[in-house]
Image: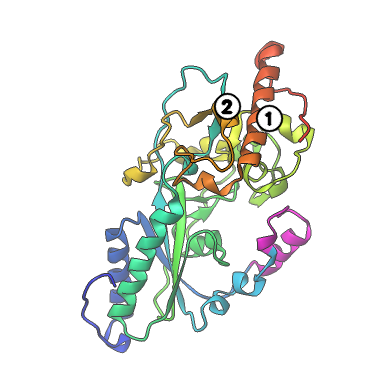
Amino acid sequence: MSGAVHCVPVSDIDPHQLAAMIKTKARGLGFDLVGITSASPSAHADALRAWLEAGFAGEMDYMHRRLDERTDPARYLEGARSILCVAVNYHFPLEPASDASTTGRVARYALGDDYHELIKPRLYDLADWLRDLVPGTRTRCGVDTVPVLEREISARAGVGWIGKNTCVIHPRMGSWLLLGEVLTTIDLPPDEPAINRCGTCRRCIDACPTGAIYEPYKLDATRCISYLTIEHEGAIAPELQRQMGDWLYGCDICQDVCPFNRKAPVATNTKFRPRIPTGRFDLETVLSWRAGQPNPTLRGTAMKRVSLEVLQRNARIVQQNIAARNDRPGGEDQADSIDD
């Protein structure tokens, strides 16, 4: 439990006052953004099924499972009435690399401590506090891995809108956000949904090297560099290898070019600070690692979810892309494919 609170029947608490108390508590636990939405079914269930049937999820088989729960939160938590949606800013500026010719880039979210382990305890504290405050309340918490459409409910709760790159964007904090939620059986007044402010901008679409954002707000995961370097375990098509550039793990291109990230604030939680200030890993070092050996560089980070075999496959691709770029006039990213 998170400490003693005054327990009262939910009928004795004004719903708006309770919502305000919850938001204050959530911010006190370190969440930068918090909003509330109803636990109503998704309005985009048919679109999700069509996306899956088109094969855009690739090898992410888990997306096909528990679809009823994924599209209806009340099936994930029986009797759910409301969802508390939270977000944490993980943005830290990266230092310039003195020599990028022997290194591979890593997505910012994976450069600090594992966000799952940082967010989950705070969500559990929030849920414990809520159950103490309102006896009989039931809750379920989630960060990334539960069958909940996090981005959709976050947009419904006003945390941010879903941008054309499919990331949740907040007008002040940008898209360097990690999401979490607490489902509850308490009926709370919902916040207004976020207003989409992408307008006519298409920088994320134009900047994606692989064309993974095939239409505004629609992503073919099988072409996304993040998917290729993390979720995809087999050989990568030669054309996609060349387009991966120097990304070793994940990709931030569509966020780097987003205008709303130009003035993104620095994260207040120092555990998100990159362990490697440049965000770049030495490729020869990665290729020297051996399976089963302790690895302090990866320990406690989100990168530990990928196998060493996949990470080293990525490192070899990056090496060839860098070599090909250096060999060609104009420095274009052209490379021969490698056989895995």
Relative to 314, say whether 167 is above or below: below
What residue sits 75% from the left and 62% below the top?
50
The segment highlighted magenta reads: 44-63
**First along the sequence among labels 2 and 1:** 2
Classed neighbour count for the residue bearing mark 1: other residues with Cα under 10 Å, few (<14), some (14–19), many (≥20) = many
Relative to 38, say whether 224 is above or below: above
Q: Can I make out residue 118 in this image?
A: yes
- Identify the image quadrant of residue 237: top right
What residue sits 40% from the left and 40% below the top?
264
Classed neighbour count for the residue bearing mark 2: other residues with Cα under 10 Å, few (<14), some (14–19), many (≥20) = many
**Is residue 291 magenta-colored?**
no
Instruction: From the viewer's side, name the closer residue of 50 and 161.
Output: 50
Q: Position of residue 289 (x, y in %)?
A: 56, 33
Assign a secondary structure to mark 1: helix
- Identify the image quadrant of residue 95: top left
Assign a secondary structure to mark 2: helix
Q: Position of residue 16 (x, y in %)?
A: 32, 75
* Image quarter in which the N terminus is found: bottom left
Secondary structure mostly seen in magenta is helix
Relative to 262, say whether 123 is above or below: below
**Is residue 55 magenta-colored?**
yes
Mark linked to residue 283? 2
Pointer 1: what residue? 317
